[in-house]
Image: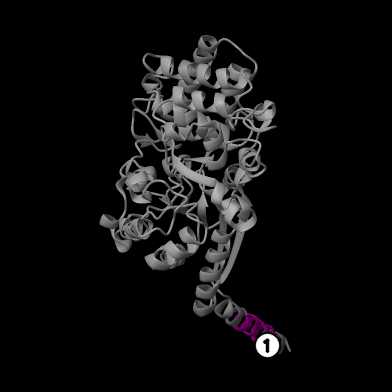
Amino acid sequence: MFWKKWMLLTLVLVGVILVGSIVLAQEKPKLNIWGRASFAPAQAYWVNSVLYEWAQEKGIDVKITWIPVGDIAAKVVTAVASGTEPDMVIGGMPYTKFAESGLLLPLDDVVDQLGRDDFFEVILQMGTINGKIYAIPMGWEITWLHIRKDLFEKAGVMDLLPFDNEEEVVQAAEKLTGVEEGVYGIGLPLGGTGYDCAWTFLLYWYGFGGGMMTERSSKGVVFGQEPYRSATKRVFAFFKDIYERGLTPPDSGEWVDISNNLAFLDGRVAMTSNPMSIWYAIMTGKPELVPKTLIVPDAFPINLGQESNFIFKSTKNPDLAKEALMVILGDKEKYRQGWCEQSQLYNLPIFKSQMQVLSENWKQGKYPVMLMDPYEAAMRIQFDEWPMTYPLGEATSVMEDFENGWMINDMVIRAVVRGEDPDKLIDEYDAKLKEMAKENYGE
């Protein structure tokens, strides 16, 4: 009797094992992907279309979650801290701190497969940490000065374009303010949350010769030293002059990322610096502004395209994650059309070959709103936004935390809106940066 029960139990166990094996064999490989939802929704639509089609053909279970611009950094950091990070991120951030901690997969093989020589060097630099590439930006996100051509002509300041220095910016803003009822000369983001305040600060800070670190150590922090101290004070004085004289809307100190976009679209400001998300909004929802708008190079343009693709080492399917990157970037023409052109050039291509196509199109009159060849505009860029750190010239987690922690925003609000002493602020934030560098890299 005992042996019969034993045989029955054995058969049951064998059956369970066989059924379990069949279920496991039938289970699809999975990829959990997060993406940064930009101000040009067409980009997300295009990525969804190509990746879901690829997943269906490969028999892969792909889930793509798009997270708002202002939320993605905090969500990624929280997910990593709790061990619930996605397999990969598309056009997101942060990534430097994860690369420095050994949490990301190197992507040099993907870059080589795509053709290293076809990348712009500055694009690869943004994702290079300690000699290896851990992040591939989705595109150039160049700052352009969006102007209301009709208001510039009415104020008689068209001859000042393009601006060569901040004095010309102020001169134009003075004449544009009040050129029509309710119009302010410039939209200057000064709010405490949102990246526009931080990158607008960086735009002029780098242009004036600002800098933060010379090496990965607390001793390498030079934020409070000359000539970098004077550059910071110069930005504060420039912003404060515009704010206190009412050349920017009085609520600028409360603006978030979308605020200067809306101010331009609503006709409250005659000019503002921004990537081409404003132009995307005009083309998709404000056609009456098309003939009234021009896009010219900023006095000190920078590249904001740090939003990158990266893969966490914890993924169970690293080869599939890299293949997904190749699906997005491998067909360079489709990438240019789907990611760049469908977003009205909110992003410019990371590949020289595709930027050359845009250049030829511009020369043939395809983009009359742009007063400069996009290829030439990209080549004018000398600085990238965070996590690039100058004068070091490399990505660092200190710069990443400096911006993601809204420290730049806080500093600008205190100096410009609240009128605190700039030297005391510089000393305070110099000390904070040294402490951050010491914690991350040591003395």
Q: Position of residue 260 (x, y in %)?
A: 61, 38
What element does badge 1 sit on? Answer: helix
Q: Which residues are magenta?
A: 9-19
Residue 433 appears in the picture as rendered = yes
Q: Position of residue 350 (x, y in %)?
A: 38, 54
- Left or right: residue 442 compared with residue 83: left
Which picture quadrant has residue 419? top right
Q: Nearer the viewer, residue 52 or 146?
A: 146
Q: Position of residue 33 (x, y in %)?
A: 56, 59
Instruction: Specify the principal SS of the magenta part.
Output: helix
Task: Tell me which amino acid carries mark 1.
Answer: Trp
Q: Nearer the viewer, residue 397 or 344?
A: 344
Count residues near mark 1 (Cα–Cα under 10 Å), then give few for <14, some for 14-19, many for 20+. Answer: few
Residue at 58%, 17% (x, y): give it.
415
Q: Is residue 10 magenta?
A: yes
Q: Nearer the viewer, residue 408 or 65?
A: 408
Residue 85 appears in the picture as rendered = no
- Left or right: residue 221 compared with residue 409: left
- Which part of the image, by quadrant, shows the C terminus? top left
Q: Residue furthest left?
A: 117
Q: Is residue 299 above or below residue 321?
A: above
Residue at 43%, 31% (x, y): give it.
160
Q: Is residue 282 above or below residue 3?
A: above
- Left or right: residue 56 compared with residue 115: right
Q: How is the image coloured?
A: one colour
Residue labelled with disc 1: 3
Q: Position of residue 174 (x, y in %)?
A: 56, 24
Which picture quadrant has residue 102? top left
- Left or right: residue 117 compared with residue 407: left
- Which part of the image, by quadrant, shows the N terminus? bottom right
Which picture quadrant has residue 78? top right
